Amino acid sequence: MKKFRTLTLAAAAIALFSGALASNAASPGACSTCFKKYQACMANGGNYYTCYEQYETCLYYAGCMVP
């Protein structure tokens, strides 16, 4: 009985941990949206530094990797 209880707790911990990891991962769509906004900023005659700063900020808040 004690072994079953330990295995059940271990399985529950693994499930919770993997769920937390999945929820923290950024969706690929969010990262590409940031790049599209960056491209639009540059296409509208935006300053490179201003557009890139907005791009990095967007990536950060979307949970994407910032280059």
Image: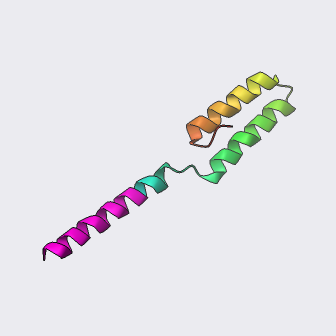
Q: Main secondary structure of the magenta part?
A: helix
Q: Residue at x 80, y 36 (%)?
A: 40
The magenta span reads 1-18
Q: Residue at x 45, y 54 (%)?
A: 21
Left or right? Give the position of 27 relative to 33.
left
Residue 34 drawn at (x, y percent): 69, 40
Q: Residue at x 65, y 37 (%)?
A: 66
Q: Is residue 62 above or below residue 42?
A: below
Residue 54 drawn at (x, y percent): 69, 29
Left or right? Give the position of 45 relative to 35.
right
Q: Residue at x 13, y 73 (%)?
A: 2
Whether residue 7 is in magenta: the answer is yes
Q: Is residue 7 above or below residue 31?
A: below
Q: Nearer the viewer, residue 39 or 65?
A: 65
Residue 42 drawn at (x, y percent): 83, 31
Q: Quadrant of the N terminus?
A: bottom left
Whether residue 9 is in magenta: the answer is yes
Residue 33 drawn at (x, y percent): 69, 44
Q: Nearer the viewer, residue 36 or 10?
A: 10
Q: Is residue 66 above or below residue 45?
A: below
